[in-house]
Amino acid sequence: MIAVPCVSPDGKPTTRGIAKLAALKNGALTPEAVADITGHPLFGVRSGLRELANAGFVKQVDDKYQLTPEGSKLVP
Amino acid sequence: MVILMEEKTDEIRLPLIGEKAPDFEAPTTQGTLRLSDFKGTWLVLFSHPADFTPVCTTEFIAFSEIYDELKKRNTELLGLSVDSVSSHIAWIRNVKEKMGVTIPFPIIADLNKEVSQKFGMIHPAQSKTETVRCVFIIDPESKIRTILYYPLTTGRNMKEILRIIDALQTTDKHKVATPANWKPGDPVVVPPPGTTEQAEERTKEGYDCKDWYLCFKKL
Protein backbone atom coordinates (compact mmCIF):
# COMPACT_ATOMS: atom_id res chain seq x y z
CA MET A 1 0.00 0.00 0.00
CA ILE A 2 1.37 3.40 -0.97
CA ALA A 3 1.86 6.07 1.69
CA VAL A 4 0.78 9.56 0.70
CA PRO A 5 0.85 12.88 2.53
CA CYS A 6 -1.92 13.39 5.06
CA VAL A 7 -2.35 17.13 4.70
CA SER A 8 -2.94 18.80 1.35
CA PRO A 9 -1.21 22.07 0.40
CA ASP A 10 -4.37 24.00 1.35
CA GLY A 11 -4.02 22.75 4.92
CA LYS A 12 -6.89 20.26 4.87
CA PRO A 13 -6.43 16.60 5.74
CA THR A 14 -6.42 14.22 2.77
CA THR A 15 -8.45 11.00 2.70
CA ARG A 16 -5.35 9.29 4.17
CA GLY A 17 -5.20 11.93 6.86
CA ILE A 18 -8.85 11.51 7.75
CA ALA A 19 -8.33 7.74 8.06
CA LYS A 20 -5.57 8.34 10.61
CA LEU A 21 -7.71 10.84 12.50
CA ALA A 22 -10.55 8.31 12.57
CA ALA A 23 -8.20 5.72 14.06
CA LEU A 24 -7.64 8.09 16.99
CA LYS A 25 -11.38 8.59 17.58
CA ASN A 26 -11.43 6.46 20.74
CA GLY A 27 -8.27 7.79 22.32
CA ALA A 28 -4.53 8.26 22.02
CA LEU A 29 -2.58 5.63 20.11
CA THR A 30 0.98 4.90 19.11
CA PRO A 31 1.93 5.10 15.41
CA GLU A 32 2.23 1.29 15.44
CA ALA A 33 -1.39 0.95 16.60
CA VAL A 34 -2.57 3.46 13.98
CA ALA A 35 -0.72 1.46 11.31
CA ASP A 36 -2.46 -1.72 12.48
CA ILE A 37 -5.90 -0.09 12.33
CA THR A 38 -5.47 1.72 9.02
CA GLY A 39 -3.28 -0.81 7.21
CA HIS A 40 -1.01 2.05 6.17
CA PRO A 41 2.78 1.46 6.19
CA LEU A 42 4.33 2.38 9.52
CA PHE A 43 6.79 4.84 7.98
CA GLY A 44 3.89 6.65 6.32
CA VAL A 45 1.91 6.71 9.56
CA ARG A 46 4.83 8.25 11.45
CA SER A 47 5.34 10.97 8.85
CA GLY A 48 1.59 11.47 8.42
CA LEU A 49 0.99 11.95 12.13
CA ARG A 50 3.80 14.50 12.17
CA GLU A 51 2.11 16.37 9.34
CA LEU A 52 -1.24 16.23 11.13
CA ALA A 53 0.41 17.49 14.31
CA ASN A 54 2.07 20.37 12.46
CA ALA A 55 -1.32 21.27 11.01
CA GLY A 56 -2.92 21.20 14.46
CA PHE A 57 -5.22 18.19 13.98
CA VAL A 58 -3.43 15.91 16.47
CA LYS A 59 -0.94 16.37 19.27
CA GLN A 60 1.78 14.10 20.52
CA VAL A 61 1.77 13.07 24.16
CA ASP A 62 4.81 10.94 24.96
CA ASP A 63 4.84 8.16 22.36
CA LYS A 64 1.15 8.49 21.46
CA TYR A 65 -0.95 10.81 19.35
CA GLN A 66 -4.39 12.15 20.21
CA LEU A 67 -6.96 14.30 18.44
CA THR A 68 -7.07 18.01 19.08
CA PRO A 69 -10.47 19.75 19.19
CA GLU A 70 -9.77 20.82 15.57
CA GLY A 71 -9.07 17.22 14.57
CA SER A 72 -12.12 15.88 16.43
CA LYS A 73 -14.40 18.06 14.29
CA LEU A 74 -13.26 16.18 11.20
CA VAL A 75 -14.00 12.68 12.49
CA PRO A 76 -17.52 11.43 11.82
CA MET B 1 37.01 5.25 4.90
CA VAL B 2 37.55 8.92 4.06
CA ILE B 3 36.67 10.48 0.74
CA LEU B 4 37.87 13.93 -0.16
CA MET B 5 35.36 15.56 -2.49
CA GLU B 6 37.17 17.47 -5.25
CA GLU B 7 35.49 20.83 -4.76
CA LYS B 8 35.41 20.70 -1.00
CA THR B 9 38.01 20.80 1.65
CA ASP B 10 35.88 19.16 4.34
CA GLU B 11 36.12 15.41 4.75
CA ILE B 12 33.05 13.26 4.30
CA ARG B 13 33.15 10.04 6.19
CA LEU B 14 30.97 7.33 4.72
CA PRO B 15 28.80 5.30 7.07
CA LEU B 16 30.13 1.77 7.25
CA ILE B 17 28.66 -1.67 7.81
CA GLY B 18 27.76 -2.14 11.46
CA GLU B 19 27.34 1.57 12.11
CA LYS B 20 24.08 3.38 12.74
CA ALA B 21 22.78 4.94 9.54
CA PRO B 22 22.77 8.75 9.72
CA ASP B 23 19.25 10.10 10.15
CA PHE B 24 17.84 12.67 7.76
CA GLU B 25 14.62 14.40 6.89
CA ALA B 26 13.91 14.77 3.20
CA PRO B 27 11.10 15.53 0.76
CA THR B 28 9.88 12.45 -1.09
CA THR B 29 7.12 11.48 -3.47
CA GLN B 30 5.18 10.30 -0.42
CA GLY B 31 5.69 13.32 1.82
CA THR B 32 8.52 14.39 4.09
CA LEU B 33 10.22 11.32 5.53
CA ARG B 34 12.93 10.69 8.09
CA LEU B 35 15.14 7.65 8.13
CA SER B 36 13.88 7.05 11.67
CA ASP B 37 10.35 6.65 10.27
CA PHE B 38 11.49 3.23 9.08
CA LYS B 39 12.61 2.03 12.50
CA GLY B 40 11.21 -1.43 13.18
CA THR B 41 11.38 -2.49 9.53
CA TRP B 42 14.25 -3.41 7.26
CA LEU B 43 15.00 -0.79 4.65
CA VAL B 44 16.63 -0.86 1.22
CA LEU B 45 17.82 2.71 0.63
CA PHE B 46 19.04 3.04 -2.92
CA SER B 47 20.17 5.83 -5.20
CA HIS B 48 19.83 6.14 -8.94
CA PRO B 49 21.61 8.61 -11.25
CA ALA B 50 18.62 10.43 -12.72
CA ASP B 51 14.95 10.25 -13.61
CA PHE B 52 13.95 9.54 -17.22
CA THR B 53 17.08 7.51 -17.92
CA PRO B 54 16.96 4.02 -19.42
CA VAL B 55 18.84 1.83 -16.93
CA CYS B 56 17.15 3.55 -13.97
CA THR B 57 13.75 2.94 -15.51
CA THR B 58 14.47 -0.78 -15.83
CA GLU B 59 15.65 -0.81 -12.22
CA PHE B 60 12.55 0.93 -10.92
CA ILE B 61 10.34 -1.56 -12.72
CA ALA B 62 12.45 -4.38 -11.26
CA PHE B 63 12.30 -2.91 -7.73
CA SER B 64 8.51 -2.65 -8.10
CA GLU B 65 8.39 -6.29 -9.15
CA ILE B 66 10.09 -7.42 -5.92
CA TYR B 67 8.11 -5.01 -3.74
CA ASP B 68 5.68 -7.69 -2.52
CA GLU B 69 8.55 -10.07 -1.79
CA LEU B 70 10.25 -7.35 0.22
CA LYS B 71 7.06 -6.67 2.19
CA LYS B 72 6.94 -10.38 3.10
CA ARG B 73 10.40 -9.83 4.59
CA ASN B 74 9.27 -6.75 6.59
CA THR B 75 11.35 -4.63 4.25
CA GLU B 76 10.59 -1.22 2.74
CA LEU B 77 12.16 0.49 -0.27
CA LEU B 78 13.30 4.09 -0.43
CA GLY B 79 14.76 5.51 -3.64
CA LEU B 80 16.86 8.65 -4.04
CA SER B 81 18.24 10.90 -6.75
CA VAL B 82 19.17 14.55 -6.96
CA ASP B 83 16.07 15.30 -9.05
CA SER B 84 13.07 17.28 -7.77
CA VAL B 85 9.82 15.84 -6.44
CA SER B 86 8.08 17.17 -9.58
CA SER B 87 10.57 15.32 -11.78
CA HIS B 88 10.06 12.11 -9.78
CA ILE B 89 6.29 12.48 -10.07
CA ALA B 90 6.48 13.08 -13.82
CA TRP B 91 8.75 10.06 -14.24
CA ILE B 92 6.68 7.62 -12.21
CA ARG B 93 3.56 8.81 -14.03
CA ASN B 94 5.39 8.14 -17.31
CA VAL B 95 6.45 4.66 -16.16
CA LYS B 96 2.82 3.95 -15.24
CA GLU B 97 1.52 5.28 -18.54
CA LYS B 98 4.10 3.75 -20.88
CA MET B 99 5.12 0.60 -19.03
CA GLY B 100 1.99 -0.07 -16.96
CA VAL B 101 4.00 -0.28 -13.73
CA THR B 102 3.06 1.51 -10.51
CA ILE B 103 6.02 2.61 -8.40
CA PRO B 104 4.78 1.85 -4.87
CA PHE B 105 7.69 3.16 -2.82
CA PRO B 106 8.79 6.73 -1.97
CA ILE B 107 11.64 8.48 -3.78
CA ILE B 108 13.74 11.16 -2.07
CA ALA B 109 14.23 14.41 -3.96
CA ASP B 110 17.76 15.21 -2.82
CA LEU B 111 18.25 18.46 -4.71
CA ASN B 112 20.67 19.85 -2.14
CA LYS B 113 22.59 16.52 -2.07
CA GLU B 114 22.37 16.45 1.71
CA VAL B 115 21.35 12.79 1.97
CA SER B 116 23.51 11.56 -0.90
CA GLN B 117 26.59 13.15 0.63
CA LYS B 118 25.83 11.67 4.06
CA PHE B 119 25.74 8.22 2.46
CA GLY B 120 28.62 8.72 0.00
CA MET B 121 26.39 8.27 -3.02
CA ILE B 122 28.17 10.78 -5.25
CA HIS B 123 31.43 9.52 -6.68
CA PRO B 124 32.97 12.51 -8.46
CA ALA B 125 35.14 10.46 -10.79
CA GLN B 126 31.96 8.87 -12.15
CA SER B 127 29.77 11.96 -12.05
CA LYS B 128 29.94 15.17 -10.07
CA THR B 129 26.21 15.79 -10.41
CA GLU B 130 24.57 12.36 -10.26
CA THR B 131 24.46 9.66 -7.63
CA VAL B 132 25.93 6.28 -8.51
CA ARG B 133 23.84 3.15 -7.96
CA CYS B 134 24.17 2.58 -4.22
CA VAL B 135 22.25 0.13 -2.07
CA PHE B 136 22.22 0.39 1.71
CA ILE B 137 20.44 -2.43 3.51
CA ILE B 138 19.49 -1.11 6.95
CA ASP B 139 18.08 -3.25 9.74
CA PRO B 140 15.13 -2.47 12.06
CA GLU B 141 17.53 -0.87 14.56
CA SER B 142 18.78 1.52 11.84
CA LYS B 143 22.12 -0.26 11.63
CA ILE B 144 23.79 -0.56 8.21
CA ARG B 145 24.11 -4.23 7.35
CA THR B 146 25.12 -4.20 3.68
CA ILE B 147 26.50 -1.65 1.23
CA LEU B 148 26.57 -2.24 -2.51
CA TYR B 149 27.90 0.14 -5.15
CA TYR B 150 27.30 -0.23 -8.86
CA PRO B 151 28.58 2.00 -11.67
CA LEU B 152 26.21 4.14 -13.71
CA THR B 153 26.20 1.66 -16.58
CA THR B 154 25.28 -1.49 -14.65
CA GLY B 155 21.74 -2.18 -13.48
CA ARG B 156 21.29 -3.92 -10.16
CA ASN B 157 20.36 -7.56 -9.56
CA MET B 158 17.12 -7.79 -7.57
CA LYS B 159 17.56 -11.49 -6.80
CA GLU B 160 20.85 -10.69 -5.09
CA ILE B 161 19.25 -7.96 -2.99
CA LEU B 162 16.52 -10.39 -1.88
CA ARG B 163 19.15 -13.05 -1.23
CA ILE B 164 21.18 -10.73 0.97
CA ILE B 165 18.09 -9.82 3.02
CA ASP B 166 17.23 -13.51 3.40
CA ALA B 167 20.80 -14.22 4.48
CA LEU B 168 20.91 -11.36 7.01
CA GLN B 169 17.57 -12.31 8.51
CA THR B 170 18.63 -15.97 8.68
CA THR B 171 21.87 -14.98 10.39
CA ASP B 172 19.99 -12.86 12.93
CA LYS B 173 17.41 -15.52 13.67
CA HIS B 174 19.64 -18.59 13.87
CA LYS B 175 23.07 -17.14 14.74
CA VAL B 176 24.70 -18.76 11.74
CA ALA B 177 26.56 -17.60 8.66
CA THR B 178 25.71 -18.29 5.04
CA PRO B 179 28.21 -19.73 2.55
CA ALA B 180 28.95 -18.63 -1.00
CA ASN B 181 25.94 -18.71 -3.33
CA TRP B 182 23.67 -19.60 -0.40
CA LYS B 183 19.96 -19.42 -0.95
CA PRO B 184 17.09 -20.16 1.46
CA GLY B 185 16.85 -23.89 2.13
CA ASP B 186 20.55 -24.53 1.62
CA PRO B 187 22.75 -25.64 4.54
CA VAL B 188 24.20 -22.83 6.62
CA VAL B 189 27.62 -22.45 8.19
CA VAL B 190 28.00 -22.96 11.93
CA PRO B 191 30.16 -20.20 13.46
CA PRO B 192 33.74 -21.44 13.94
CA PRO B 193 34.67 -22.60 17.43
CA GLY B 194 36.54 -20.17 19.64
CA THR B 195 38.50 -22.63 21.74
CA THR B 196 40.35 -25.88 21.17
CA GLU B 197 37.84 -27.62 23.42
CA GLN B 198 34.94 -26.38 21.28
CA ALA B 199 36.84 -27.43 18.16
CA GLU B 200 37.19 -30.93 19.61
CA GLU B 201 33.51 -31.12 20.49
CA ARG B 202 32.40 -29.64 17.20
CA THR B 203 32.99 -32.90 15.32
CA LYS B 204 30.69 -34.74 17.74
CA GLU B 205 27.73 -32.39 17.46
CA GLY B 206 26.12 -33.94 14.38
CA TYR B 207 27.04 -31.20 11.95
CA ASP B 208 28.31 -31.89 8.45
CA CYS B 209 31.93 -30.99 9.19
CA LYS B 210 34.60 -30.84 6.49
CA ASP B 211 37.03 -30.04 9.26
CA TRP B 212 36.79 -28.47 12.72
CA TYR B 213 36.50 -24.92 11.30
CA LEU B 214 34.04 -25.62 8.48
CA CYS B 215 30.78 -27.19 9.58
CA PHE B 216 27.39 -27.00 7.91
CA LYS B 217 23.92 -27.69 9.23
CA LYS B 218 20.40 -27.66 7.85
CA LEU B 219 17.90 -25.33 9.46
Image (cartoon, grey):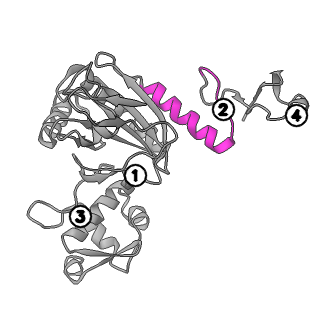
Q: Is residue B145 left or right of residue A38?
A: right
The residue tagged 1 is B38
The residue tagged 2 is B177
**B13 relative to A14, above or below:** above
Mark 4 to mark 3 CA distance (whole Å) = 56 Å
The circle on residue A51 is 3
Highlighted magenta segment, given as a residue range: B158-181
Q: Disc 1 or 2, which lies upstream in sequence?
A: 1
Q: Evaluate if marks 2 and 3 touch, with contact meaning CB atoms under 8 Å apart.
A: no
Q: What element carries label 3?
A: helix
The local crowd at label 4, few if under 14, some if 14 to 19, many if 20 or more residues have their Cα within 10 Å, is few
The residue tagged 4 is B205
Classified by dominant secondary structure, the portion drawn in magenta counts as helix
| Tags 4 and 3 on a common chain | no
Q: Is mark 2 on a helix, strand or loop?
A: loop
Q: What's under tag 3, amino acid-wise?
A: Glu
Q: What's under tag 4, amino acid-wise?
A: Glu
| Tags 2 and 3 on a common chain | no
Q: Residue at x 22, y 38 (%)?
A: B113
| Tags 1 and 4 on a common chain | yes
Mark 1 to mark 4 CA distance (whole Å) = 40 Å
Q: What's under tag 1, amino acid-wise?
A: Phe
Q: Disc 1 or 4, which lies upstream in sequence?
A: 1
Q: Which residue is drawn at 39% across and 25% down?
A: B149
The circle on residue A30 is none
Quarter residue B197 falls in: top right
Is A9 or B120 nearer to us in this picture?
A: B120
Q: In this view, does A4 lie to the left or right of B136?
A: left
Mark 2 to mark 3 CA distance (whole Å) = 42 Å
Quarter residue A29 falls in: bottom left
Q: Quadrant of the C terminus of chain A?
A: bottom left
- Asked whether residue B62 appears in the rendered view, the answer is no
